[in-house]
Image (tube, rainbow, N blue to C red):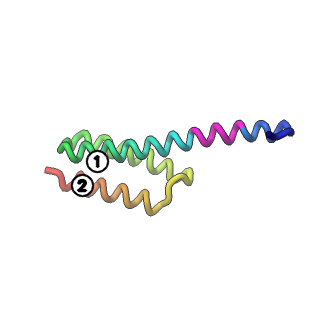
Amino acid sequence: MPNIKSSKKAVKVIAKKTDANHELKERVKNLIKACEKEVAQGNKENATKVFNDLQKNIDTAYQKGLIKENKVNREKSRLNAKIKNMK
């Protein structure tokens, strides 16, 4: 445990940021799963809504450095292609 006051505060700040980052990464993963589920069910409207929400969150995660650029582009490209190919 840190003894210096600023170090104690830094530990709290790091813990808070870690929780927020973990929450954002989980939200992205859950939105990817939800989009895949909507595509599998054939719900184009709902899949599009979920995909739009996913794009916003995944871009935020990329800007924060939580997800690499190639993964972001790959996920968005694959899901967008699946949605476009739906009947």
Q: As drawn, which residue projects farthest toward the right? A: 4
Res 80 → quadrant: bottom left
Q: Is residue 29 left or right of residue 49?
A: right
- Residue range in magenta is 12-19
Mark linked to residue 52: none
The image position of residue 54, as x and y in percent, is: 38, 45
The answer to which of 25 and 86 lies nearer the viewer is 25
Q: Is residue 39 left or right of residue 31?
A: left
| Residue that numbered label 2 is attached to | 82
* Mark 1 and mark 2 residues within 8 Å of each other at the beta carbon: yes
Mark linked to residue 36: 1
Where is 44 relative to 81, above or below? above
Q: Main secondary structure of the magenta part?
A: helix
Q: Residue at point 44% right, 41% down?
A: 27
Nearer-N-terminus badge (1/2): 1
Q: Residue at point 76% right, 36% down?
A: 9
Q: As drawn, which residue projects farthest toward the bottom? A: 70
Q: Is residue 54 left or right of residue 13?
A: left
Whether the magenta-drawn stretch holds residue 84 is answered as: no
Q: Nearer the viewer, mark 1 or mark 2?
A: 1
Q: Quadrant of the N terminus?
A: top right
Q: Amino acid at mark 1?
A: Glu
- Give the Cα separation between the discs numbered 1 and 2: 9 Å
Q: Amino acid at mark 2?
A: Lys
Q: Is residue 85 left or right of residue 9?
A: left
The answer to which of 36 and 82 lies nearer the viewer is 36
